[in-house]
Each structure stands twice: as structure tokens, then as C-alpha cells.
Image (cartoon, helix red, strand yellow):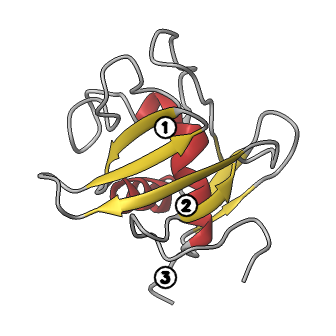
Amino acid sequence: MDENWSGAGTKDDPWNLRTPPLSSAFTIYRDEESDPPLLVCQVGSTKLTYLARAVDDLHDMLLAHGDWMPLGAADEQKDAAPGTVEAWGRSPENPVGGWYGQRKGYRGRFGMYVPPLMEALGLVELEHNPRNNRVRAIDQRG
């Protein structure tokens, strides 16, 4: 098991992850009871939620992209840099036609919290530099 994460991904045993620069810890779990299913991310006292399908959708997009993509994490109130995971996570061009983040006012930071989960699941390679990290898909089809 990678030292950057632990947990089973349930409410009672969430994944314990670190942000891409490895500077902050957070937990995330998959809530299958909500409709639609959500990823519930706890960062200190702040709760963020993202559509659970974001994991598969982002993986598919990164596979199609075929190369490294900058994360570009930004709060909801700030514009996301073009060509980043963050911009894709709120774009009308993505599979859900907009925000994967579901909690109004806290819909951003998609590029900060979803890629570490994908790394823990073995779906992506993720850089861990102090800033400007990138991600790329691992093709599971062999």
C-alpha cells in the first residue's frame, strides 16, 4: 500500500489521502446512498461533494487525452486555467455538462481532491511537486 493513502472508501472507513503536493491530509468516501452517488470529501471542517462518476469520466478523458494534464485546482469563485483537470471538471463540454462538484460555493478544487483518489485506485500517475502538478491516465485494459 502506498504511504500516501489508506482506508476502504466507506463512510466508516474513508480513504485517508494527501493532496498532490503531499502538504495536506483529507478523507474521501463513496456515498452510494445518495442519488446520484457522491464522493464525500472532508478537508478539515469543510465538506465537499463530487459526483462519484467523476472517477470514471475523468479517467476516460485522460485516456483520450493521452498525455500529462495540469491539475489547475481552483476554488469555485475563481476561473480555472484552460486545459486543466479543474477546467474540465466544470466545463459544459464534460459528460455531465458542468460542475462535478455538488455543494454550492464549494464546487471547485476538483483538480486537488479527485486525482489523489484516482492514484490510490491505480487509475492515474500523479506528480507530487510543491506546485503545478500534472496527472495522466494508466490504461487498465492492458
Identify residue type, mark 2.
Answer: Leu
User: Which tag, 1 or 3, sits closer to the chain's start?
Assistant: 1
Residue 88 in the image, given as x and y percentages of width and height: 42, 35
Identify residue type, mark 3.
Answer: Gln
User: Which tag, 2 or 1, sits closer to the chain's start?
Assistant: 1
Q: In this view, does 103 lie above or below 26?
A: above
Q: Closer to the camera, 83 or 50?
A: 50
Residue at image position (81%, 49%) is: 22
Marks 3/2: CA–CA distance? 16 Å
Please give the label number shown on residue 140.
3
Q: Which residue lies furthest to the bottom in this view?
A: 142
In what element is the residue under mark 3?
Answer: loop
Label 3 neighbour load within 10 Å: few <14, some 14-19, many 20+? few
In what element is the residue under mark 1?
Answer: helix
Q: Closer to the camera, 23 or 136?
A: 23
Residue 50 in the image, given as x and y percentages of width and height: 35, 43
Label 1 neighbour load within 10 Å: few <14, some 14-19, many 20+? many
Q: In this view, does 79 lie above or below 57?
A: above
Asked where in the image residue 96 lies, by quadrant, the reply is top left
Please give the label number shown on residue 117.
2
Residue at image position (34%, 28%) is: 91
In the picture, the quarter occupied by the N terminus is bottom right
In what element is the residue under mark 2?
Answer: helix
Residue 142 in the image, given as x and y percentages of width and height: 51, 90
Mark 1 or 3, closer to the camera: 1
The residue wearing badge 1 is 110
Asked where in the image residue 104 lies, by quadrant, the reply is top left
Mark 3 or 2, closer to the camera: 2
